[in-house]
Amino acid sequence: MSRGQEQPLLQVRNLSISFSQYFKGTKQRVIRPITNMNIEINEGEVMAVVGASGSGKSLLAHALLGILPRNAICEGTILYQGEPLTEERKALLRGREISFIPQSVNYLDPLMPVGKQVQIGLKKNVAKTVQRRLFQQYDLQESDGSLFPHELSGGMLRRIMFATSIREEAKLVIADEPTPGIHPQALAEVLKQLKQFAEKQAGVMFITHDIISALEVADRVAVIHEGSIIEVSRAEAFEGKGEHLKTDYTRKLWRALPQNDFDLELIDGGGDK
Ligand SMILES: Nc1ncnc2c1ncn2[C@@H]1O[C@H](COP(=O)(O)OP(=O)(O)O)[C@@H](O)[C@H]1O
Ligand SMILES: [Mg+2]
């Protein structure tokens, strides 16, 4: 994390996201999967956001990117570089200063050569040059550019995806579970990339349900539970029996990991160990 900066790169204050739903045909009710959420990310920092499935991780990412479903009602304040991140600003920065690394390589177009896909969103006159540079950066051969996704290995596809998501001017990188079920080498590569963005002073939000991966790169870890951030701790606090963690929930999450002997007596209802 860089020191002496005046303000966090990103400040989310009291964010709530609700959906109006119909049930029993005509009756309407409002559900609110994100409630008064607060989180801040500094330049040069990897902030992991960890939480169970359905806790609201993707909604948070989509709110920051301005890609929530149309019927979502979003309340609260999001500041980026100290200024309100309005929907117009999100649309302007998305894919440029604010990069999104999606979960799946299925985001790639199966019918378009991968080199072309990396050029999408780049200015026409420099697209080719920038694509070449990105290929070098991600250890891809120039000739790979004319191949289609099905002709590439999983590891190469993931690197292509980074090359399509990341632009030189990226200042905030949002990665939504970029590591589901990938083999260890590809995982190490993704983690390395995330770290590199932070080393170049970008703020990185690394969304995952995998605490162990998160701890390999994160400076801080935010724990999301039922739509709220219930704890933000430095990565170093995740050690031993979690004595330095702030909430019981996070301590339980930590102690229940296989590496920590599945200390299940700490999990509600799991006291038969
Ligand atoms: N379009 C939607 N309409 C209604 N509820 C939604 C919608 N999208 C997500 N939700 C609800 O919000 C909760 C959080 O979803 P999500 O952010 O995708 O979770 P996560 O990414 O942590 O697994 C889920 O329980 C889901 O029911
Ligand atoms: Mg999700």
Image: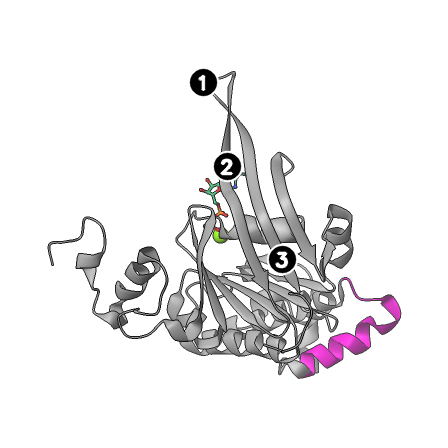
Residue where numbered disc 1 is placed: 24
Q: From the image, state whether disc 2 or disc 1 is nearer to you.
A: 2
Q: Of helix, strand and loop, which one carries label 2?
A: strand
Q: Quadrant of residue 149?
A: bottom right
Residue where numbered disc 3 is placed: 11
Residue at 42% from the left image edge and 46% from the top image edge: 226
Q: Point out the image quarter for the C terminus.
A: bottom left
Residue where numbered disc 2 is placed: 32
> What segment carries the magenta color?
121-136
Task: Reply above or below: 257 against 236.
Answer: above
Q: Is residue 211 left or right of residue 99?
A: left
Q: Is residue 68 visible?
A: no
Instruction: Indicate the amino acid at tag 3.
Output: Gln
Question: Mark 2 or mark 1: which comes first in sequence?
Answer: 1
Task: Reply above or below: 260 against 72.
Answer: below
Q: Is residue 241 left or right of residue 76?
A: left
Question: Mark 3 or mark 1: which comes first in sequence?
Answer: 3
Residue 104 spot, x, y in % from top left: 53, 59
Q: Of helix, strand and loop, which one carries label 3?
A: strand
Residue projecting furthest to the top: 26
Q: Of helix, strand and loop, which one carries label 1?
A: loop
